[in-house]
Image: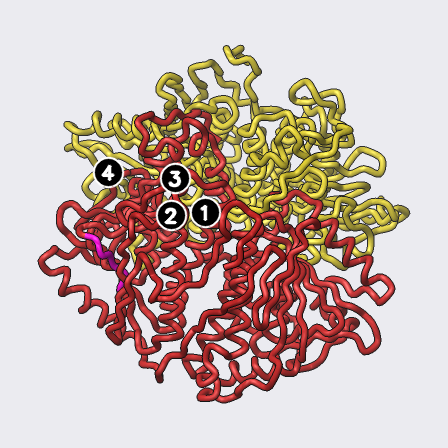
Chain colours: A yellow, B red
Amino acid sequence: MESTATAIAPVRFETRPADYVHWRLVIEPPVARLVMDVQEDRPFRPGYPLKTNSYDLGVDIELADAIQRLRFEHPEVRALVITSGKERLFCSGANIYMLGSSTHAFKVNFCKFTNETRLALEDASRHSGLKSLAAVNGACAGGGYELALACDEILLVDDSSSAVSLPEVSLLAVLPGTGGLTRVTDKRKVRRDRADVFSSLGEGVKGKRAVEWRLVDEAVPLSRFAARVPEKARTLADLSPEKAGPGIVLDALGGTYTDEGIEHRHVRLHIDAAARVAEITVTAPAADEPSDAPGLRKRGGDLWALRAFRELDDVLLDLRFNRPEVGVVVLKTRGDAARVLAADQALAANQDDWFAREVVLHMKAVLRRLDLTARSFLALVDEGSCFAGCLMELALCADRSYMLDKGDGPTLAFSALNLGPLPTWSGTSRLAQRFLGEPGKTDPLLGEAYDAAAALRDGYVTFAPDDIDWEDEVRLAVEERASLSPDALTGMEANLRLAGPETMETKIFGRLSAWQNWIFQRPNAVGEHGALTLYGKPARPKFTWQRT
Amino acid sequence: MESTATAIAPVRFETRPADYVHWRLVIEPPVARLVMDVQEDRPFRPGYPLKTNSYDLGVDIELADAIQRLRFEHPEVRALVITSGKERLFCSGANIYMLGSSTHAFKVNFCKFTNETRLALEDASRHSGLKSLAAVNGACAGGGYELALACDEILLVDDSSSAVSLPEVSLLAVLPGTGGLTRVTDKRKVRRDRADVFSSLGEGVKGKRAVEWRLVDEAVPLSRFAARVPEKARTLADLSPEKAGPGIVLDALGGTYTDEGIEHRHVRLHIDAAARVAEITVTAPAADEPSDAPGLRKRGGDLWALRAFRELDDVLLDLRFNRPEVGVVVLKTRGDAARVLAADQALAANQDDWFAREVVLHMKAVLRRLDLTARSFLALVDEGSCFAGCLMELALCADRSYMLDKGDGPTLAFSALNLGPLPTWSGTSRLAQRFLGEPGKTDPLLGEAYDAAAALRDGYVTFAPDDIDWEDEVRLAVEERASLSPDALTGMEANLRLAGPETMETKIFGRLSAWQNWIFQRPNAVGEHGALTLYGKPARPKFTWQRT
């Protein structure tokens, strides 16, 4: 890791099971166990002990890594048990001292990342045949219960003291910020008055009532708990068909990290700090990629489609956490569009193979991460670019796109991946979302090269300046965008990027997170006398009583 | 109007066309024209001139009144033209100096009320056969364009200078807060990259491009504009069947307003300021109500179902604007449940009559106003109560309900109005939303009296304490609720009350408003150097560039 000029070491997201500090990943096919055993004295930043199996970003980075590795490295695993290594304690949620001492921006980004991780768990259940069981072996509060909510089933030990709870409102004057309120009503369909009681009650609900209220699926006496967990896990595993192993290995990305950006094999991030502008360039495969399932699996972690998107993911997380002042991100592509289309075609043709499917699911997740990254994205379809297939999705993700209009200039192209396999959080493809107003619109011709005139005519790009105007128009667009209020842009983009149908996921990021962000600024939570500020201190919070 | 101890005179929402200051309502059946001609020197509060047809709460209270009166008093009107009385100027939106000098709570409540007013326009189009046309005869910015967006069609004068625009982001560092972003993408289905350009471009879009981008329906040269408006209006009117007139009269509610509450004919508000608790008591009809359509219409504005809900509406708005420190609202009913059920039955049986339909639509709107009121509601089904039919909806609106369990104690009852005609903003009945987890659940037996045991068994109330526990349990619930952070409760309730499906309306109140509330607190908008603060002053805003 390179040193940087900033006071705080930058956040890095790569890890591997051998380096896990807080989790143990135990593989016992078809089941895996992920045991949370947080090391109190190993917080991500100095200054707060990670007591009572509470988590911070470091704990969650390991969890995200584990879920990803299970999907790619362990196709033999079809059920995941998430449990705790502590006695009578499942997890007490996000560490409050960490939250209380974090900046607003960090809190918001921390919540976004933890939300994405929990949604990855649900995506794995829905699409990868990896079902999950929360084996709640003790007290389970706040983010701990929200993690359980992200699992397919929740087993609670019925020992007359272990409860599930969401104490955020009553104890901290904030919301359960990792999907809790939304999943309680929309996923578990808890009756809203019960959800109200539950969410405003610090001590939570246990045993039979927790089952009756739909908060958990089963409450099992301690004496039978240890036996019931694997039994349940096995039942969950049996819901999914077996996959043809073995898994592939996710190598470390490496990458060179400097103040000026990141150099990965296929993805490059370059920062112009003075202009507050970043440039992301994704390069097409340099040679032909494998086209059949065995070939794809053999290429494994070195497959362009997997590695390029892992690198893009790393770059997006770097932007979010380490480059807070960058307001505009210019998206570029370089290389041979035909190779991108061929790589897409190989994936699309092999969707009955678990690995090809997993690669596309991963692409989907990275593009969704882009959709949720609070920066303005401008795609530049310039000379040498290859916005084709999965890379064309970058242009569709962008808030706007500019395409150079000149003879023999750049072209766009589409693959089967643009027509459905890479939906936004709203559940529809980016093309469908783009053309909400033209429901009968014909799909683009796959593989066809669209020049600027055709792309403009069919609505695939926003503007197509010619050679003479190109430089000025692009420069002005970037400068103007970078001059606007970052907050207003975040709110605007959060609304415009999620047009059309809403899903539980868009509710979590749109409604719940927006309210939480509001509350994260209110004096009643974060002021001198706020409940979050004073948590664990002898002083009682003092509230301003105005309702808003 | 009674004087109060507060420094600022309380906001009152009753008005009538003869008292309008800023609008002219011209009835020319089947068309009505609502002409905005804002009087610069008559702001709602002293301190800001209402220049360039900008609006404040006073202007919007008149608009809300006009829409309501058209629905009840003018069934002969089937198309409404909204236009401006100023030369080459439609409306420049909410007054910025008013916004800049308002408290956070006022801004939030102002936006909520203006949103509800625009949604009333859309509801009238969808359900009352009152179509609307925005005749945009000049510059149309921000809230002005948002008002146009709430109409069925937008006609823009094509005079090479008149544009529609959303300059909030670029000029003020806030969002278009009256549904603009949501309606651009979800109602008018503007392509998201164009919506992005449009929403970040101060000067807006005019003429042919405005049509091409779906921002308006037609751009008409000035020479043909005056003739085209009535033509279009007539076409819209022809879409709806005629209604059997005449209209009914909405009398002034009167009411006695004091620091301690409000006394209306059927609804009473009582404030316990020290406890920060309010009590709303709705009384059933004191005598039999008419049961056939002519009888209903003859009773008109004195019909219990109309008047009681108008009074309730007034009380809710009073709570929002004039009682900011009240955190908990206890909902009570008194009187004869049989009379409520009979009144409901009369409405349900006459839904082919425009007036009976309008009364139910009004009930729906008031209940939705309750759903969106940022206070905790606890329904108390105590002795003497009559939670039946439309009043049962109050218990279903409440965050929780408590029902006294004793021999010969209170009962609940349902009418046909509980099964669909009063949907929440999510589009489903409160019963359906309540039982999302039990989709096959049987509807309640209409007219049947449910005692506490039956109500608890069937999930219609949250708790049913007996005589011995009742007082303590209710007192504790109210006290505990009132002790929690107002902001956390607002966020929690905004999430739990809108479980299940999402609509354009829930997106406006959930997503858009939540982001706007966040931005309304950010220094980049409202700080010393914020854009909203400095609007119209020589100093340029200074932004903190951190993206969040």
Label 3 – label 4 distance at C-alpha: 15 Å
State the image coordinates of residue A459 (x, y, percent, origin top left): 26, 46
Relative vertical location of residue A193 with respect to residue A250 in this rendering, above or below: below
Q: Which amino acid type is marked by label 3?
A: Cys
Q: Quadrant of residue A188?
A: bottom right
State the image coordinates of residue B520 (x, y, percent, origin top left): 47, 39
Q: Are marks 3 and 1 on the same chain?
A: no
Give yes or no for contact between labels 3 and 4 (Cβ–Cβ under 8 Å): no
The residue closer to the viewer here, B536 or A62, is: B536
The residue closer to the viewer here, A73 or B89, is: B89
Residues rendered magenta in the picture: B81-86
Left or right of B259, for residue B401: right
| Mark 3 lies on residue | A397
| Mark 2 lies on residue | B181
Q: Are marks 3 and 2 on the same chain?
A: no
Q: Which amino acid type is marked by label 4?
A: Phe
Q: Residues within 10 Å of mark 3 (few under 14, many from 20)?
A: many
| Viewer-nearest of discs 3 and 2 | 2
Label 1 element class: helix
Give yes or no for contact between labels 3 and 2 (Cβ–Cβ under 8 Å): no
| Mark 4 lies on residue | A463
Left or right of A211, for residue A129: left
Mark toward the start of the polypeptide (3 vs 4): 3
Q: Are marks 2 and 4 on the same chain?
A: no
Q: Which amino acid type is marked by label 2?
A: Leu
